[in-house]
Image (tube, grey):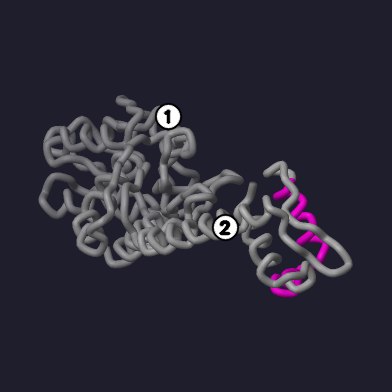
Amino acid sequence: MHLDDLQLFVRVAELGTLSAAAREINAPVSQVTRALTRLEAALGARLMHRSTHGLSLTDEGDACLAQARRMLELRDTLHAELAPRLSQARGWVRVGASALMAQAVIAPSLPSLYIHHPDLHIDLSTDDRVVDMAREGIDVALRTGDVHGEHLVARQIGVASRSLYAAPTYLAQHGHPQHPADLARHHLITLSHTPNMNLWPHSDGQPPLLAQGSTRVDQTSVLLSLVLQGVGISRLLDAAARPLVANGSLVPILPGQFASEAIPIYAVMLKERHRLPKVRACVTHWQDWLAAN
């Protein structure tokens, strides 16, 4: 039994004819007839007598009309109560991001997010791998690079870039490389799970350098930690490295020698969830925050 069929039955009873009800919803009479037939089949009772003189309710139809009006009134009351809540950004939003993206973008942007949307709550899941969003209950994921998936909606919210960095302690012990060729004599830290990120593009158009790491890791957050500890040189997200350069914890390596190409940052959502007010509020906030920062 469908509420739409119940509502149509109530209008037929009130208007007195199938054709009047059909005109009201701008539909053929056959559609109204099928709705009444479905309702009668669902209830197992005949609700109306149909004759050349018009329509009249059976005893069962009269009882159904009273209950149908109560059900439709309850539906309208429920809609009236929930509509303001559903139009506001409130509740938990489960966010997926790499640990480095969480550190560079999500963490510093959360205070202003909570100021603008005090009823929002963030459940943050950090992982460098591309997760199954439906299986893991992710409402929105922040990702860089290409995004694929027929069940996904991707909205570009900003751009990122990567450059080479090292800690002052490493440079004090091993010296500053002066030319890209010097990197062959240095300790490089690379990523094991995304080999394409170990291709460091030259700014002069030469083929990219395939970084041969003396240390490999599978998490970008660990990559940053190792660089900070003076283990070696690596290519880091500029948004995460910039404040560490400002406080003296990191030093840019060979600035201008390697390309800092613009890498799109996407907010990725499931098709059935991307219109939720709470999800839209987060995505818009991060887009504005990235533009300002």
Task: Tell me which corner region of the image, top left, top right, bottom left or bottom right, holds residue 87.
Answer: bottom left
228 is higher (above) or lower (below) than 275: above
Q: Which is the main secondary structure of the residues drawn in magenta?
A: helix
Labels in figure, total: 2
Q: Is residue 118 left or right of residue 139?
A: left
Judge whether 127 appears above or below 88 on screen.
above
**Residue 32 among magenta residues:** yes
Residue 193: mark in rendering? 1
Q: Which mark, by number, is residue 246?
A: none
Crowd tier of the residue under label 2, counting other residues whose Cα lies within 10 Å: few below 14, some 14–19, many 20 or above: few
Looking at the image, is 128 positioned above or below residue 55? above
Provide the secondary structure element on which disc 1 rests.
loop
The stretch of residues the image draws in magenta is: 21-40
Q: Classify the position of the C terminus by image quarter.
A: bottom left
Residue highlighted by disc 2: 66
| Location of residue 219 in the rendering, given as x and y in whole percent from the top left corner | 33, 32
Helix, strand or loop at label 2? It is helix
Residue in the foreground of this view, choosing between 188 and 63: 63
